[in-house]
Amino acid sequence: MRSEGVDLVEGSSVNIQAALSARLVGAGVVWRLADVSSPMILRRAVGLVMPALADAILVNGHATLGGYPGLSRAADRVTVYYPMIDDAAFQNVGRRRRPEGKVIIGMVANINPDKG
């Protein structure tokens, strides 16, 4: 990070190495939480250290936010976001026709036990 002149680092979930590395080189830290599949003891630890390490915390929903006790200490840096899809782009796509204004959106993702 130092040799590349990194200014901002994104870390995620319970992996604190990114945040620690960023702080060692003086880079900013954005921490993203997208699941609660890690054991509660790890999520509690992250909830305690994240306020000290992160400049911004992105959480993909209120349920995920509730899964990391201690984040209330960083409430001014927490942003709850929801992944966005422009459903207007898909109004006339697909074999099945829906009533006017109705769109059903599916998602294909990597399914593995680590994601819960």
Image (cartoon, rainbow, N blue to C red):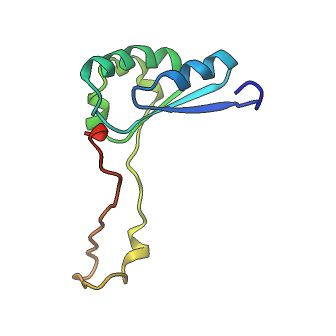
Rendered location of residue 18, percent (x, y): 55, 26
- Residue visible at 43% across and 66% down in the picture: 86
Residue name at image x 76 percent, y 32 percent: 4
Q: Residue at x 43, y 14 (%)?
A: 49
The residue sitting at the left extreme is: 99
**Residue 85 location, quadrant:** bottom left
Can you say whether 53 is above or below 58 in the image? above
In the shown orientation, is residue 9 left or right of residue 7? Answer: left
In which quadrant of the rendered image does the N terminus lie?
Answer: top right
Regarding residue 54, the answer to whether it shows in the image is no
Where residue 61 sits, quadrant-wise, is top left
Q: Nearer the viewer, residue 116 or 89?
A: 116
- Left or right for 55, reference 98: right
* Vertical comparison of 15 with 83: above or below: above
Of residues 115 and 103, the one nearer the viewer is 115
Q: Residue furthest front?
A: 112
Residue drawn at point x = 25 percent, y = 85 percent: 97
Task: Tell me the quarter of the image containing the C terminus.
Answer: top left
Vertical placement of residue 21 versus 90, above or below: above
Q: Is residue 95 visible?
A: yes
Q: Quadrant of residue 80?
A: top left
Q: Give how far across and how far down residue 77 sits, in percent.
A: 48, 27
> x, y (%) of residue 6?
71, 31
Nearer-the-camera pick, 114 or 40:
114
Q: How many marks?
A: 0
